[in-house]
Every structure is written in C-alpha cells, then in structure tokens.
C-alpha cells in the first residue's frame, strides 16, 4: 500500500454544510471544520478527472471508492494539528493562567452508582483531591503534534494548561478558522438586476485570514493510501460546497502521520491504553464500537486491522453528544441519509488483555476504527493512541497551586 500526501490551500472560504432556510432564500452555513466525507468526495472527484480523464464509469467509481482517504487536519509549518481530547478540564486562574485536570476512570465507593449504558463501565472523574466547584474554561479546539504527544504520554509540564487555553496566542494550539459571511442575490438574466426577495447567505471558513499565533498559513492536510498511488498533483479544484476553489498539491511526508517514538515508549510496558478519535467515527452501536462485544460481563474486542492476539477491554469513555452527518451523493445523484457520528476528540479508556500496547499504536496510529469498511476508507474514525493512569497524582499544575 502506497501513501500519497496532499496539501490543500483554500483560495475562497470553505463551506461544509447543507442548505438551510433563510428569509426568502437559503442559508448555507459551514461547520467549524470539514467532515472526512467532504475531503473524500472532493479528492476522489479530482482524481477521477486527473487520473481517469473525467470518465466516471461504474468501474471508475468503484476504484475511487476503494481509495483510503485520511484527514482533513490543520497543517502548519509541515506538521499536523489534532482535535483537542475530551478527557481534560481547564480551570481559569485569571491573568492568563490555567490549571488542567485529567478525567480518568474512577471506582465508585460502596453505595454509589450511576446509569452508564453497561454495568462494567466506570465513570470518568476528576481527581479526588479536586473538591472546589468551577466552570471549565474553554480549551483550544486543535493541538499541535507536540502538545498532543505530551498529553497522550502524560508527560506534561507546568506551562501545559496555559498553552492549550483558548486565549493562548502561541503555536501549540489553534482556533477554528474565522467565518466569512456573504449575502448573495439572484440575477434576472433578461434585465441584469436582482430578483426581488431572492436572497441567500453563505458562511464559509476563511483560511486566508492572517494568524499571528502561527508562522505560516493554516492549510489542510490529507493522505491517500492505494495499491498504485497516483501522479503528482498541482492544480486548482473545488473543496466543499458551492464549488469554492482550493489549491491541491502533492507533497512529501507530513509530520504526524506516523506514530511518534514517545508514544510507543510510553505504551511498551503499559497495560492501560487510551484511544482518541482524531476524526468523527461511525459505530454500529452509536457511541459504542461494534468491534467490542460481551465477554464474561466485560466489553472486549480488537479494532479493525489491529495486531494478532490483541484484546482491549473497555473501562470508560469521554464522549460528546452525537453529530448529524448527511450530504449529497454524486453516485446516486441524491441526498444521503442522515447518520449519527461520534465527535472527534472523544476518548475511550481500555485495559490491554493481549499483545503489546506499543504494537497497537504503531499499527493503528491514524488508522480508522469505524465498523463499516467504506466508512474506514472515507476516513471516519481515525484514532490516536496513548497511555493513561488513574489520576491519583491530582492536577497537572500542582506547582502553580503552590505559588
């Protein structure tokens, strides 16, 4: 299997959402970040034109759908950024200082209980020494590779909380792209004037806005895995709705697609494995992966493509509310049915029952863990891997607390 990497530079605000009513016309509002299906559809359409000369015969469609597409991720200075994980809470200490607390599986005391969907699951809780109530501060939606590795290996330093806060201006984290709103009108061909009441609005993601926090423009990174690869690409092609143009270019390997050595080292002798969804996932059990099944009262299984002999037991999870997924199918020339996806950043806590956890990370780093083979090829459910402890050490910022 050969990997081809792409850098996508939007020339116009990207739109990734269905049309909605707005006044007398429609409102096209983009998501905060494109879904994998937006990337997969745009990339396959472009390859159908460049590799097959625009011949979208049934054979070509089958070939395109068999291409494994991964992404999209923010790309800055040649390195990937990833969605922030859900297993963290930030406490605002004022004056741009923050304290970070990990959410970890915790045993309940005698007489305590909760309504989790399976009796073997434990709630993900704050450390026991956190007794004061506080409103969690906002976390930056994207973390750099270095920052994510630090969190997944639990090797954070005292400055870590401030570097991932939403007010941080450095290169360790990113905000969502700014949104660009435009009002459009329908033109009457015969007279060349606006048609009364025929208004529509588009709100897109503006990647051209200057960001002082990073040294380079934020681009979009993608990977394609196939048996034969493809020819070099350097062309303009639409990305997302309304045919907004972007510059597609083949490139060399981008930093972050392969498992960092620090991750493998942290998992070599660790029996506790953390799975973080880098892209939204689609599971047959809603929030629960279909590859986990009942075994002696526990939820046990092995992710698709995992090493032989691997078994993971689900202990807990930090999962946000489901998100809707739909779109337009060029194959059937009609709308796609609405589906529920597990949001990116959701975290699953496992205990390893077989095979080295380091082999898990090396084999499955940024590989899809979704149930359906086509969803995996479309890039849903790409996973990051790390270790976890029970959080008895308390918060990350103990040094700050002593000041």
Image: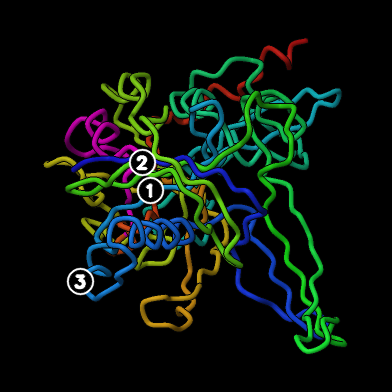
Label 1 secondary element: strand
Q: Which residue is disc 3 drawn over? A: 59
Q: Give the Cα separation between the discs numbered 3 and 1.
A: 22 Å
Looking at the image, is 202 positioned above or below residue 354? below
Q: Are marks 1 and 2 in contact (CB under 8 Å)?
A: yes
Label 3 secondary element: helix
| Dot placed on the residue nearer the N-terminal end, 1 or 2 | 1
At horizontal 54% and vertical 69% (from top left) the residue drawn is: 324
Looking at the image, is 392 positioned above or below residue 245? above
Res 330 → quadrant: bottom left
Q: Position of residue 186 (x, y in %)?
A: 77, 81
| The one of 366 and 343 positioned closer to us in this rendering | 366
Q: Which residue is disc 2 drawn over? A: 366
Q: Is residue 336 left or right of residue 299?
A: right
Q: Position of residue 266 (x, y in %)?
A: 35, 21
Q: Is residue 62 magenta?
A: no
Q: Are marks 3 and 2 in contact (CB under 8 Å)?
A: no
Q: Which residue is disc 1 drawn over? A: 70
Q: Position of residue 223 (x, y in %)?
A: 36, 43
At horizontal 42% and vertical 63% (from top left) the residue drawn is: 41
Over which residues does the magenta segment extend? 350-370
Looking at the image, is 382 positioned above or below residue 360? below
- Image quarter where the N terminus lies is top left
Res 202 → quadrant: bottom right
Residue at the front extreme, as displayed: 190
Q: Are marks 3 and 1 in contact (CB under 8 Å)?
A: no
Mark drawn on residue 82: none
At horizontal 73% and vertical 81% (from top left) the residue drawn is: 21
């Amino acid at each position: 299997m050969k990997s081809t990497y792409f850098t996508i530079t939007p020339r116009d605000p990207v739109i990734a959402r269905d049309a909605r009513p707005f006044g007398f016309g429609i409102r096209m509002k983009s998501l905060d970040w494109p879904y994998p299906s937006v990337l997969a559809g745009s990339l396959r359409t472009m390859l159908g034109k460049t590799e097959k000369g625009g011949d979208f015969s049934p054979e070509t469609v089958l070939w395109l759908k068999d291409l494994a597409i991964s992404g999209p991720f923010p790309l800055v200075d040649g390195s990937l950024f990833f969605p922030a994980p859900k297993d963290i809470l930030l406490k605002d200490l004022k004056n741009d200082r923050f304290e970070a607390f990990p959410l970890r599986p915790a045993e309940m005391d005698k007489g305590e209980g909760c309504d989790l969907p399976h009796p073997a699951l434990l709630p993900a809780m704050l450390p026991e020494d956190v007794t004061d109530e506080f409103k969690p501060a906002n976390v930056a939606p994207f973390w750099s590779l270095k920052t994510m590795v630090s969190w997944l290996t639990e090797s954070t330093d005292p400055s870590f909380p401030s570097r991932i806060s939403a007010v941080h201006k450095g290169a360790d984290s990113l905000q969502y792209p700014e949104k660009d709103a435009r009002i459009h009108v329908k033109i009457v061909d015969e007279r060349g004037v606006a048609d009364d009441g025929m208004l529509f609005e588009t709100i897109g993601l503006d990647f051209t806005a200057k960001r002082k926090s990073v040294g380079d423009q934020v681009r979009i990174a993608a990977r394609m895995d196939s048996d034969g690869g493809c020819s070099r690409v350097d062309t303009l092609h639409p990305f997302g709705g309304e045919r907004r143009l972007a510059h597609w270019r083949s490139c060399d390997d981008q930093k972050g697609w392969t498992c960092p050595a620090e991750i493998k080292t942290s998992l070599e002798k660790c029996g506790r494995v953390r799975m973080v969804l880098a892209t939204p996932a689609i599971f047959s059990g809603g929030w629960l992966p279909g590859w986990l099944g009942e075994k002696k009262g526990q939820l046990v299984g092995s992710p698709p493509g995992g090493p032989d002999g691997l078994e993971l037991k689900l202990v807990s999870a930090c999962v946000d509310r489901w998100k809707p997924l739909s779109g337009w199918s060029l194959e059937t020339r009609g709308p796609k049915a609405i589906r529920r996806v597990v949001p990116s950043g959701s975290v699953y806590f496992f205990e390893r029952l077989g095979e080295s956890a380091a082999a898990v990370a090396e084999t499955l780093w940024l590989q899809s863990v979704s149930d359906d083979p086509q969803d995996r090829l479309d890039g849903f459910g790409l996973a990051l891997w790390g270790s976890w402890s029970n959080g008895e050490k308390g918060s990350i910022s103990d040094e700050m607390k002593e000041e």
